[in-house]
Image: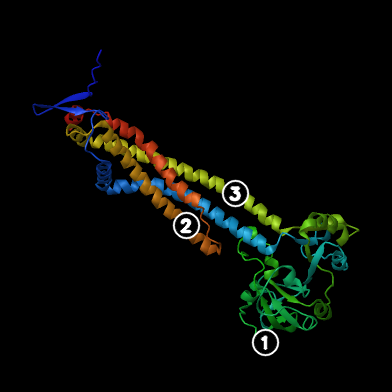
Amino acid sequence: MTETPASPTTERSTTGGESFDTTDAGSLKSGFRIADVFGTAASGLSTRVLRTVLSALGITIGIGAMVAVLGLSQSGSAALEDRIAALGTNLLRVSAGQGFGGGDASLPEDSVGAVRRIDPVSSVSAVGSVDESVLLNDLVNPNQTGGLSVRTAETNLVDTLNGSIRTGRFLDEATIDLPAVVLGSTAAQRLGLRKIDGTQVWIGEHWFTVIGILDSFDDQSDDVETTLFDDLDRSAFIGSAVAEKLFDTSPSPTTIYVRADERFIDDVIDVLPNTVDPESPEEVEVVRPSDALEAQEAAESTFDNLFLGLGAVALLVGGIGIANVMVIAVIERRNEIGLRRALGATRAHIRRQFLLEALLLSGLGGCAGVLLGAAVTAWWATRQGWRIVIPPEALIGGFVAAIVIGAVAGLYPAIRAARLAPTEALRSS
C-alpha cells in the first residue's frame, strides 16, 4: 500500500473578488529571511519613537537600579576591605567604661606598662586628655573651640595605628618634652593650617610650635557610621611631660591602643580587662575596631537586598509595560498583519516579528540600564574615594534579565498577532 503525502494546510482568503492561498507556519518554505524579520521588527519600533523610549524606560530603571546596587555594594565592600587591611584586624582599643564616668575618664596610671607585659602584644600606645583648647592665636575667644581637643600622646602612636604624617614629623624623643604640637587632619583644617613653617598655636595660655600635621586616621571621617578615629583627627597632640608641667594634667591615659599577634588576639582580649584594672575589670571596655567595619558591611548587605528587591519590582513593572505596549501594537496594526499574511507571511513570521520587537525593546532598555547602573556606580564610588568595582555578572545578568523579561512580555502579543486570520484583519481596517 502506498502512503499519500500529507498536503500542506492552507487558508483561503478573498480580497476584491480574487481568491488565493496563504500557508501556515512550517508547511512551505518561505523566502522571508531572519534578516527581513529583524528589519521589519526594527521598523515597527522606529516609527513609534516616543512610545518605544517610554516603554524601554521601565526596563532601564529596573536594570539600572539592580546594576547600581550590585556595583555600589561591591565597591563599598572593597572600600571596607581596604580599610580593614589598612587598619589591621589585630588592633584593639581599650578605654574606660561607664563605670569610670564615661567620656574622657582615665584608666589606671600603670595600665600601659601592664599591657606591654602581655606576651603576644607587639605594640602599645596611649593618649590622654588635656582640659585645654587649641586656638589659632591668643585673640580667639577660648570658648570657640571648633570641636577640637588637646591630647597627650606617646611617640609611637602613629606607628601603632598604621597612620601617616602629611607634613613635618610626629613627636619624638627630641620634642616630646618641649612645647611642640602635632595636629590631626581635621584640627589643621579647622585652624586653617596647611603648612607648618614655624607656625604657633595657642594652647591654654601658652604658645606651642606646630611641628607636624597628620593624615586622617580614618579616610572616611565624614561618614558617621564608619568613623573610628574621628576624635584623633580632631585633636592636637602634645607630650605628657609638657602637659603635666604646664597644665597639671594627670599622667593616666584615657585610651590605649594595642597591637597583638593575630593568632592570640582572642586570648589578649580576654586578659586585657584584668591586666588594665585588676580591681574593676568590668569597667574596662575593649573594642576591636575591625569588628565595627565588618558589622557595617553585614548591615549594608541587608539594605542591598532591599534595593535589589525594589529594582526587581521596577523591572517587573517595565515588563508589564512592554506587554501592554505590544498588545496595543497588535490591535493598532491589524491591517498591517492582515496585509502581510495576505501577501504570504506565515504565522511563524508574524510571531517572530512581534516577539523580536519585544526583545529589541527590552534589549534597548537593558543596554541603557546597564550603562546607567555602571555610570551611577562609577560616579558615586569616585565621589566617595572608593575603588570602582562593577561585577561582570551584574552587567551580563542585567542584559540577560532584560531579554528574558522581553521574551516573556512579548510572547502572548506575538501569539495573538499570529492567530489573526487575514480576512478578519483586513476586514477590521
Q: Which mark is residue 335?
A: none
Q: Which mark's residue is nearer the viewer, 1 or 2? A: 2
Near-viewer residue (269 or 241): 269
Q: Secondary structure at mark 1?
A: loop
Q: Secondary structure at mark 2?
A: helix
Q: CA distance from mark 1 to mark 3?
A: 48 Å
Near-viewer residue (70 or 353): 353
Q: Where residue 50 sits in the image (x, y, percent)?
A: 29, 48
Badge 2 density bin: few <14, some 14–19, many ≥20, Cα 10 Å:
some
Q: Quadrant of residue 353?
A: top left
Question: Residue type at mark 1?
Answer: Gly
Q: CA distance from mark 3 to mark 2?
A: 18 Å
Q: Where residue 41 sits in the image (x, y, percent)?
A: 27, 43
Near-viewer residue (165 or 248): 165
Q: Is residue 113 above or below residue 377?
A: below
Question: Residue type at mark 3?
Answer: Ser
Q: Which mark is residue 198?
A: 1
Badge 3 density bin: few <14, some 14–19, many ≥20, Cα 10 Å:
some
Name the residue rendered at 75%, 71% in the picture. 157
Q: Where residue 91 sits in the image (x, y, percent)?
A: 74, 62
Q: Are marks 3 and 2 in contact (CB under 8 Å)?
A: no
Which quadrant, please, contains the N terminus? top left
Question: Residue type at mark 2?
Answer: Val
Mark closest to the chain's N terminus, 1 or 3 = 1
Circle 2 residue? 376
Mark closest to the chain's N terminus, 1 or 2 = 1
